[in-house]
Image (cartoon, rainbow, N blue to C red):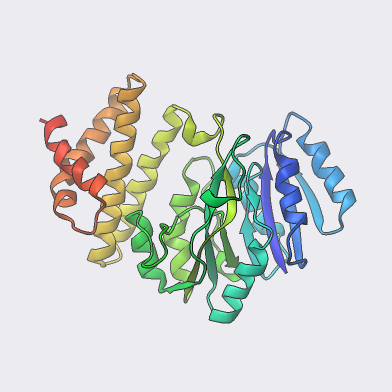
Amino acid sequence: MVSIIVPAYNAERYLGACVESIISQSEPDWELLLVDDGSTDTTGKLCDEYMRGDSRIRAIHRENGGLSAARNTGIDSARGDYITFLDSDDVFAPTFLERTLAAVRETGAEIAGTSYAQFSDELPAWGSHGGCSTGRIESEPRRAVIKALYQRGLKGSGTRMDSSAWGKLYARSLWEGLRFREGQWYEDLDIFYRLWPRAGKIVFIPEALMGYRQHGGSFLHTATLRRSDVLDVTDRMVRYYEKENDPELLRAARTRRFAAHWNIYLLLKQHKIVNSEIEGRCRKIISESRGEVLKNRAARLKDRTGGLIGYIITK
């Protein structure tokens, strides 16, 4: 059985489409854990109604603690052999569970990831824009982590191996003693590099089997200093690999940290946000890492270009 964990906070607008995409799965052996994270709208009531309508659905109500806390509550309550996550404004393609379960069972992998289709109220999730070639790509976890840190695609996939927690099926055993860090953003980036290596093998299906909703209210579409949490996350990541004695992984982590600090620096400038502490922190990492990233042929052209520009902004 698969435990599907859906954190829901003030999600009344999109929760129906999310739940319907789960009920419509071609694979019937699942449980849905709707974690109402202290909603102040009708989300809690909707969760209870869905639970009454399908015995596979459980509604869990908790005080508001954020996405990580809600996901952790779901993990603690899960009964399935496998776990997957879906945000309350996103959807699964009808064969998401069937295809990912087949992938892990037939390859012996403990994580199966898929591509995703971006959609909105105006643009449907499934269509010519949302697909890629079918098939499977198997990867040793260390290589998958490196690709994700460089934000590059797996060979032959046409899509990058995304570090997001959603869009993947996990053996529940991987989560023993490991939970999302609560009270911060970028929780997916914070955990993936510690979670993936626990698997013996990762398999990737380069086809859009999940719909990722785009709307102005989403976190990554807002200009907020909470986004600077990524600085702490990537600093922590680099410190982690400094202890691992793996120069290739450390170099990849330093490149990911460089990209994060560049992104926040640009956020400050584009939105005219004045914060000398955060700007100084970004400029320091850009200055320290620009040469290394510029010379790193594994880095994206975007990041290597950032390394070159870094010599200008940090004069």
Q: Do we see residue 259 in this rendering?
A: yes
Judge whether 18 appears above or below 147 on screen.
Answer: above
* In front of the other: 75 or 28: 28
Which part of the image, by quadrant, shows the C terminus? Answer: top left
Picture layout, residue 268 above or below residue 31: above
State the residue at coordinates (40%, 74%): 140
Name the spot of residue 288 as percent of width and height, x first.
16, 43
Left or right of 295 on screen, residue 179? right
Name the quadrant of the N terminus: bottom right
- Tell which residue pokes out farthest to the right in this image: 52
Q: Nearer the viewer, residue 266 or 154?
A: 154
| Residue 261 in picture, x, y percent from top left | 30, 39
Residue 242 appearing in the image: no
Tally of numbered tags: 0
Residue 151: x and y in percent read: 36, 53
Name the residue rendered at 20%, 47% in the picture: 304
Q: Give left or right: position of 167 versus 37.
A: left
